[in-house]
Amino acid sequence: MRAREFRQAVDAEFGERGRVLVADLVLGELGGLTAEQALDAGVDVERVWLALCRAADVPVGRRHGAGLRDPRDA
């Protein structure tokens, strides 16, 4: 997953509140960083996406991200 794909997935999954979640939701599994802070610190984009999904209770079937291949189809 690339940064552009991350932004698309956030927009598709969370809509208007996505930017707020990325900036403000503290992700415990990423050491208490927000998604934005984790990305700025160089944490792998896919790891940040999955942590955000888990924290926001996104169903597993939608965690592959908008426009991205569902890994269950591999």
Image (tube, rainbow, N blue to C red):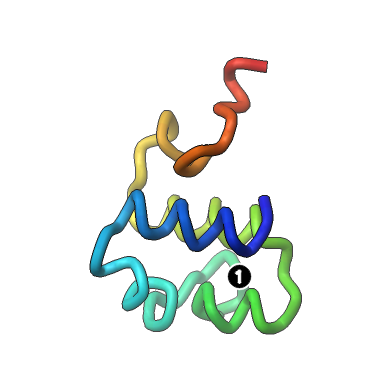
Is the C terminus in the top left, top right, bottom left or bottom right quadrant?
A: top right
Q: At which x and y percent is residue 72?
A: 58, 20
Rendering quarter of residue 62? top left
Question: Which residue is rendered at x = 65% and y = 53% of the image?
Answer: 46
- Mark 1 belongs to which amino acid? Leu
Spot the residue most to the top. 73
Q: Nearer the viewer, residue 63 or 12?
A: 12
Rendering quarter of residue 38? bottom right
Q: Is residue 71 above or below residue 48?
A: above
Secondary structure state at the residue bearing disc 1: helix
Q: Nearer the viewer, residue 67 or 24?
A: 67
Question: Which residue is rendered at x = 55% and y = 51% of the image?
Answer: 50
Report the side of 43 relative to 14 (left or right): right
Q: At which x and y percent is residue 64?
A: 53, 38
Report the side of 73 relative to 11 (left or right): right
Q: How many marks?
A: 1
Mark 1, Cα crowd under 10 Å, few <14 / some 14-19 / many 20+, is some
Question: What residue sits right under mark 1 in the picture?
Answer: 30
Q: At which x and y percent is residue 7?
A: 49, 62
Q: Is residue 48 above or below residue 36?
A: above
Question: Which residue is rendered at x = 49% and y = 70% of the image?
Answer: 27
